[in-house]
Image (cartoon, rainbow, N blue to C red):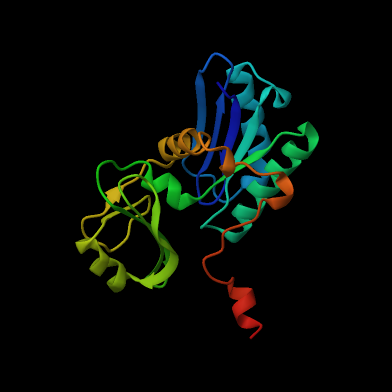
Amino acid sequence: MKTFLAIDTTASYLTVIAKNKAGQIFTTHLPDCAMNHSVKLLQTVEKTLQDAGMGITDCDFFSCVVGAGSFTGIRIGIACVKGFCTATGKPCLPVTSFDEIAYTTEGAKTLSVISAGHHYCYVCGYNIDKEVVLPPSYHSEAEVQALSNEYTLAGFETMELSGMVHADMAKGLLLAVQAKQKNPENFMPCERLTALYVRKSQAEENRK
């Protein structure tokens, strides 16, 4: 039974989950982090590990959400996990925010939807076994709505899309980590941990 620390800093919330040697799960979820992840992350990690009766060296691996989401938030989470992995020599397990959403639904093809602003969305499609069948991509809300004929739409934000299933992202993070850790090929050394950016940042677009 593997112990782990998992974090999600990709949106306005902050989630930290620790699993100890007894198999107990301890979750700290701040619904509104006001994009202060760099200030609150380490103290939240410390609190969650204390609740679990663990230290950093007790973790068999570390996991973080690598995107899609806030560009700055993604970098904060990755930097934190890389630091923990470097300090302990333990591997990391990347999870996407699309994975988190998909693992909160059951028995149906799921289209994980994340707002990209200006009536556009980042999406990723999964079959009922949670395998990616539509790679991460960028679509208008109208295009996403059309895909509801094939998929169950799911996300954690309020959007102008009908039939949207609300995803509990703390629950989704736990389920995604628990599922992905079963495959050794999903683990990697921290040097290989990279962000998932579905499209370029606004700064990069403006440099064209």
Residue drawn at x 66%, y 44% is 188
Depth check: give the residue in front, 35 or 17.
17
Task: Identify which residue is drawn at 56% across, 63% down.
Answer: 197
Q: Is the residue 197 above or below the residue 186 in the image?
A: below
- Above or below, 5 relative to 144: above
Location of residue 28 in the rendering, given as x and y in whole percent from the top left corner: 52, 31
In the image, 90: left or right of 167? right
Query: Who is closer to the viewer here, 61 or 73?
Result: 61
Percent of width and height locating residue 155: 35, 52
Q: What residue sits 50% from the left and 28% below the top?
A: 27
x, y percentage for residue 103?
A: 38, 42
Give residue 154's position: percent from left, percent from top: 32, 52
**137 to the left or right of 146:** right
Numbered-mark total: 0
Can you say which quadrant of the picture contains the N terminus? top right
Which residue is nearer to you in this view: 18 or 206? 18
Which residue is outermost to the top?
22
Q: In this view, does 14 lie to the left or right of 141?
A: right
Residue at 66% from the left image edge and 33% from the top image edge: 43
Q: Residue furthest right?
A: 87
Is the residue 177 above or below the residue 149 in the image?
above
Residue 46 figure quarter: top right
Quadrant of image for the C terminus = bottom right
* 125 left or right of 84 in image: left
